[in-house]
Image (tube, rainbow, N blue to C red):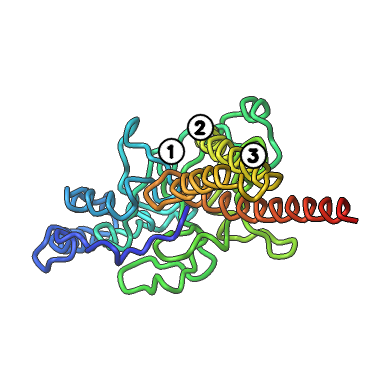
Amino acid sequence: MRFVDRKSVPAPASLVDPDGAGRRELEKASKHYLDPKAETFAFKAYKRPDVKEALRELFKKKCAYCESLHEATSSADIEHYRPKAGVDGEPGHRGYWWLAADWDNLLRSCIGCNRVEGHRVAEAGMTAAQLAAQKVQSVGKGNAFPVSAVRAFKPGDDCDREDPLLIDPTRRDPGPHLAWHTDTDLSLLSPSFHGAVADAYGEHTIRIMALNRQALVEARTRHLQRLNDLLFDIAEALDEAAVAAPAQRARPLQRVTRKRAQLRAMAGADEEFTAMTRAFVAAAEGELLARYRELLEAKAEQADAVGA
């Protein structure tokens, strides 16, 4: 999950025009919910083609939560960050129905993150075999929306006072709240820690969205292997350059430049698992810099010893 600037894509006209489908639907829903016994309103405006296309562009064809490129195998859900038809754990809440066609409340989500389904979920330190042996549990966002402060129940209530524990990547930068583990057998995500205390936003988001579910972890791990293959190639070329005479360093250093460019390209915003890849690249470049410096220093010491 990475921060996405919602202002980078214009809001769909059907939702924001004064006479658009969103405004007209809100008027009908407001009358509908005057009846305290009314069933859930049948919302449709958020499904308009211009809304789907705007969300597709905003999130680079990816799921807003897990960053998977899932279009080849499954359709995308238009996800209501604040659920429109009820809230888990709040029996009297009718959902944030007044935000059903609010552009700022809509995200693009894969089915695995958005719908409550059965998944095996990985825990820290698990191997692939241990994950495969996990019991299936029902996970996914559904109508979950935990808050740590005063919940909004009706139009006019201040949603900004709720302090939602689920990260909306267009409102809150996920980076400080999540930690990637890219030096393990499986690509796992955990909350950041503040001392011994797990970050509440990261913890709730990972659990509710099932961001360590088996299929997702396996896909990220395959991606991680490709990254590690590139890193190995770079390290090998650096080793060769470090022990080579100055006149012979050009070719291995060209390989380093080419492979490094490939590694950085995989961290682009339109690539799958961008946040994980950027965490990997940042760690890898620091490791490579230290390794190359160490090799050069060792070679200098050897030269000094020979000279002595």
Q: Secondary structure at mark 3?
A: helix
Q: Is residue 78 depicted above or below 195 in this figure?
A: above
Q: Which mark is residue 236?
A: 3
Q: Secondary structure at mark 1?
A: helix
Which residue carries the number 1 mark?
Answer: 112
Label 2 near label 1: C-beta < 8 Å? yes
The span from disc 2 to disc 3 (Cα, nearest Å) is 32 Å
Classify residue 18 as left or right of residue 103.
left
Q: Residue at x 8, y 65 (%)?
A: 19
Which residue carries the number 2 mark?
Answer: 215
Q: Which numbered disc, 2 or 3, marks the residue that appears first in the sequence?
A: 2
Classify residue 29 as left or right of residue 5.
left
Q: Residue 58: horizontal and vertical position, in percent?
A: 30, 55
Choose mark 1 or mark 2, whichever is in front. 2
Q: Secondary structure at mark 2?
A: helix
Q: Amino acid at mark 1?
A: Gly
In front here: 143 or 102?
Answer: 102
